[in-house]
Image (spheres, rainbow, N blue to C red):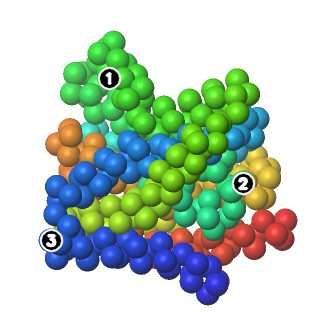
Amino acid sequence: MLAIFLKTLPFFALIGLGFWAGRTKFFTAEATAYLTKFVFYFALSAMLFRFSANLSLADVWNGRLVAAYLWGTAFVYGIATIVCYVRGLSIEVTAIEAQCAVIGNVGFLGVPMLTLLLGPEAIGPVMLALAVDLIVFSSLIVILITGSRDGRMSLRILRTVGMGLIRNPMIVAITLGLAWSGLKIPIPDPMNEFLALLGAAATPGALFAIGASLASKSAERLSVAGWLSFCKLVLHPLFVAFACFALFKVDPYQASVIISAAALPVAGNVYMLAQHYGVAPQRVSAAILVSTAISIISVSLWIGWVTKAAVGV
């Protein structure tokens, strides 16, 4: 377990460096926003395109794995929703809290960290987790918030969801990469080297950007943040693991990757959605801050456990 912790430590050290830069104003909020844009639209997209272009759809798609991840995620989403109902919260706030409970930082943290820690074969399961998060649950939160405000479902809501998916560079990069692979077009050497060079900036850039953005987050509503962090860091990977090993009999290695992805802290894009719709942004901010701090230990524990389980099965 100590060996896993020491391997994950450099990743969180980069997050800590970014946090220091943001907290001391050496890196301003505007600089953080532009760094995030660079990583999101260019570096991470190049990494995802290059990974997926070198894979076939058969290498990525696994129905059992999708079912296990979707089942575990939906179960915890349901738990968070029921707790919100008992507390008498509105549909909008419930949607935001449930999103915090299950949507981890798979894009910025999971893709670079898990592919390095668990091997290049991890990219397929990680991309599946990312796709489920973006296509299913990021669409669901838009439908719930917009639908509750309009009082009904409409074509406008579906159009908003569809445009959000089309404009997401991570979805576009994965889709184009798999299409390129499906056409069996070899990537020219200059293009491959360009993508490799640009994609190499994704890992340090994304981790630094996470830390710098955390510097502007507050830790209000710590009781709620603690509950949401517990959902994300403990319940989410726990129920995904149950689904993988007990319900859907997923390949042990692929299960270890998807469980590790589920163990990641709350994603920053949940805060962007909360801020965009004006729904409990401070609550989300605290959940991101608390879950990221705790994940320095918890992620190492989960990765250590799943790798042992994968060997022992």
User: In front of the other: label 2 or label 1?
Assistant: 2
Residue 25, label in figure: 3
Query: Where residue 157 sits: x, y (%)?
Result: 32, 20
The three-letter code of the residue at mark 1 reads Thr
Give percent across and percent down for residue 264. Answer: 49, 62
The quarter of the rendered structure image containing the C terminus is: bottom right
**Residue 121, numbered label:** 2
Residue at figure coordinates x 16%, y 55% from the top left: 30
Circle 1 residue? 160
Whichever of callouts 2 and 1 sits on the residue coming sooner in the sequence is: 2
- What's under tag 2, amino acid-wise? Glu
Q: Is residue 299 left or right of residue 56?
A: left
Helix, strand or loop under label 1? helix
Compared across the picture, whether 295 is left or right of 86 comes to right
Circle on res. 309: none
Image quadrant in which the N terminus is located: bottom right
Crowd tier of the residue under label 2, counting other residues whose Cα lies within 10 Å: few below 14, some 14–19, many 20 or above: some
User: Gap in Å between the C-alphas at discs 1 and 3?
Assistant: 36 Å
Q: Image quadrant of residue 210?
A: bottom left
Of the numbered discs 1 and 3, the one sitting upstream in the chain is: 3
Q: Nearer the viewer, residue 216 or 88?
A: 216
- Seen in the picture, residue 80 relative to 8 is either above or below; the reply is above
Corner quadrant of residue 108: bottom left
